[in-house]
Image (cartoon, rainbow, N blue to C red):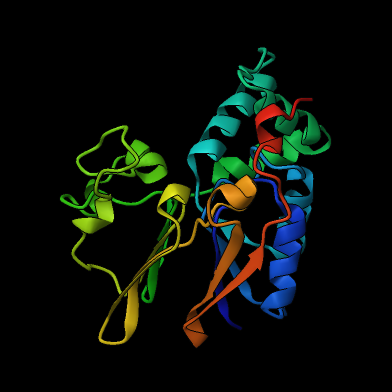
Amino acid sequence: MRTIFIGDTHGCAAELQDLLTAVAYDGDRLLLAGDAFARGPDPLGVWRLIEETGAEMVLGNHDARLLEQLEDWAAGREPTLQKPDQRYTFAQLDPVLADMLAWLRRVPLYIEDSRFLLVHAGINPEKGLAGTSRDEFVSIRTWPPTKSQADLRWHDYYEPAHPLLVFGHDAPGQLVVKRRDGRPYLLGLDTGCVYGELFGNQLTAYILEEDRLVHVPSRQHKDQWLTRDA
């Protein structure tokens, strides 16, 4: 059984299916970098593929917000759905809200074994895994933290402490591959699938045992998600 990491899907179920076909998925271990459902056209389709494959996932910033919305829904409070894409996602997931809430409650901030560490956004490059806060796990990007997309990333200061660290979250940073002694020690797999041609217009996977990246093209138009509503 192979170990296959997949970058942020953001509701792009068709591309996720394309990627499973491209890697010749056959009961392999699938590990998602988070932000699986929000913004894209088919969050329910992504959920069905997760159910079908038994994919594991780490919590992303959009997943954390969806979890908060689901907790409000379960408590009988009106969920805070501030943007059209949030309303769309919540409406599309209506048939499975209870199941998704139970699942998201179990989704960890990181998945680690002897061969890799998977997180959504990254880790604190000074304090390491043990010193990383929840907010950093789901949303860290630049270091020191700023709102500028042009500043240096956290991983520019990261000294390898794990055999391989895999993350998503940073579509503006596009694909990140850093190697040492011929093997990757850091991979950033968010290639902006949901944004169409605006960023990397791909969905990306990495097959650990084969040291191989696999890409499928985005089917999205860059402006669709900005106006999508329920």
Q: Residue at x 19, y 40 (%)?
A: 144
Q: Residue at x 35, y 40 (%)?
A: 149
Along the line of sight, the residue nearer the viewer: 218 or 124: 218
Q: Residue at x 73, y 44 (%)?
A: 43
Q: Residue 107 appears at what percent x and percent y?
A: 54, 48
Residue 164 versus residue 183 in the image, above or below: above
Location of the N terminus by quadrant is bottom right
Which quadrant of the figure has residue 185? bottom left
Along the line of sight, the residue nearer the viewer: 65 or 203: 203
Q: Residue 167 appears at what percent x and percent y?
A: 42, 58
> Relative to residue 87, is residue 159 drawn left or right?
left
Residue 168 versus residue 116 in the image, above or below: above
**Which residue is the extreme one toward the right?**
95
Q: Residue 67 appears at what percent x and percent y?
A: 58, 33
Q: Residue at x 50, y 46 (%)?
A: 59
Q: Is residue 102 visible?
A: yes
Which quadrant of the figure has residue 56? bottom right
Which quadrant of the figure has residue 187? bottom left
Residue 64 versus residue 211 in the image, above or below: above
